[in-house]
Image (spheres, rainbow, N blue to C red):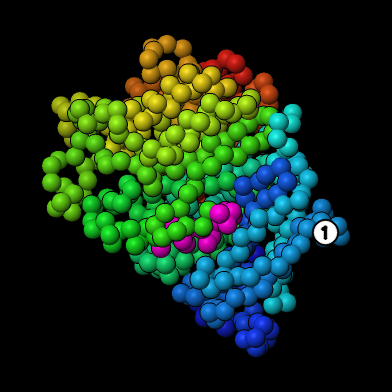
Amino acid sequence: MPHISRRSLITGAAGSAALLSIGARGSVPLPHGLFTLGVASGDPLADGVVLWTRLAPAPLADDGGLPPISIPVRWEVAEDERFGRIVRSGQVRALPEFGHSVHVDVAGLRPARRYWYRFIANGETSAVGRTRTAPAAGAPVDRLRLCFSSCQKYEAGYYAAYRHMVAEDPDLILFLGDYIYEGAPNNLGVRRHLNPEPVDLPGYRARYATYKLDPLLQAAHQAAPWALTWDDHEVANDYADALDQENSDPVAFLRRRAAAYQAYFEHQPLRAATRPSGSSMRLYRTLDWGALAQFQIIDDRQYRGPRACQPEGLIAAHKRYQNLVGPCPDLYSSDRTMLGTVQEQWLMDRLGTSKARWNLLAQQTLMRQQGRIDPLHPERGPQFSADSWSGYPAARDRIFRRWVEAGTANPLALGGDIHAFAAADIQDPAKPDGPAIGSEFVGGSISSLFNDASFKAQAAANGLKFAENEVRGYARVDLTPGLCVTTFRGVSDARREDADIRDLVRFSVEAGRPGLQI
């Protein structure tokens, strides 16, 4: 990434303006430096992939430094990185109402192939990205290498993990939420958010631009296709449906959520069909990798029901919700939902119809029941997070029961959110002391911290086979038809861009034989 001064980022004045013909509008001057935010690809299919960029010569400005006009952008896909064999190309228009972002659903590519892509606008050429297509539907696949993580708070650390992730040469990168953090700038971090806490579209655009300008994050997007889902910080901490953590005015919050959802779409390699409508955006979907794997990618924020066991009157009084709750009848109510009725039924259908050898549930957090003893009030006994699956146990158990009833092949749950690595076996809810029916892996955080001295001890008491909250990093998953090998990789110090990395632990799961093996 070429050096870009802070002044040029803010003003967009670097270089002389060029003239671009915009149809009947005539010639409109545009500044140079259109591709400051890099390029990305995502959601690969057997015959295509999504390509993304956003034109923003002044990425921290409300309008990205561009006039309110549509701008033609050429895209090219080639079989070689020198673009000697261009196989697909075309032109789209970057529209101001979507922040001059570009989403191209490329079709007509060959399955299981590596490709290179780039964009051209106003005489400038973007960085070159590398992507790949998925294998053909039902095709035999020898291997898949996947890297996944979550939680990359900009202020908490640098993105050394991505440098090592790129070196792994993954087929796919899976990101499981908290791509940005929405809080106000904090002077205690290793670096600082560059705009106040966002509550509207310009604010969220500037926050995404802050993250997207990081060269290591850009390099990770350029190296492989991504598949993403979100968690809470893409909007507001611990939000649930139309309520934020303060139980503030839901009408005002939905306006904020609409702005956050649009900014998310504008900055990610998502299909045009994902484009939000107001405060609604369908993000759940499946991603198939030949006969080897199916990813069920879900959204556990947008549709979830109210938090359990809350003191009476909190919502009406707009008071902060209670995070840790003890057992109460509401907690275990069978009609409580984490996914909403429509998404849950969609997931149940997919779990019953998947023909894949491995089924990977890509979701946001730890699924195993996690009781916690409050060190300030141990007399209260185990307390459960009202913001995780522990606060929606019936909804979680319906998924596990479906794995058993449908005979879903080799199910695994992948998660993030907790700023820690974790691994556990999952049992049939009807036989909690029985054999494993699947396993789960939480792949650490890229930079976000979790300072809890009791985490490891309490995790062991809750049946986790591995727990590590003092190291940042990611998980690497190597899948073959007969074996899943998951390696947790931790950087030496996320406060350093040049941090090295080591393997923390490695687990294997044999196809047809549920349960973790070290």
**Residue 323 x %, y %:** 25, 41
**Residue 104 x %, y %:** 65, 59
Residue 270, magenta (yes or no): yes
Identified by mark 1, the residue type is Ile
Which quarter of the image is occupied by the N terminus? Answer: bottom right
Give 506 or 146, whichever is nearer the viewer.
146
**Residue 90 x %, y %:** 74, 64
Q: Which image quadrant is residue 143 in?
A: top right
Q: Which residues are magenta?
A: 259-273
Give 130 or 141, whichever is nearer the viewer.
141
**Residue 480 x %, y %:** 68, 26
Q: Image point 60% across, 33% down: which residue? A: 294
| Magenta highlight: main SS | helix
Q: Which image quadrant is residue 91 in?
A: bottom right
Q: Image point 62% across, 47% down: which residue? A: 43
Q: Is residue 203 above or below residue 77?
A: below
Q: Is residue 426 above or below residue 288?
A: above
Query: Is residue 203 at all visible to an observer of this figure?
Result: yes
Q: Image point 48% across, 18% down: which residue? A: 404
Instruction: Kindly state the secondary structure of the residue where label 1 is placed.
Output: strand
Q: Is residue 6 above or below residue 498?
A: below
Which quarter of the image is occupied by the C terminus? Answer: top right
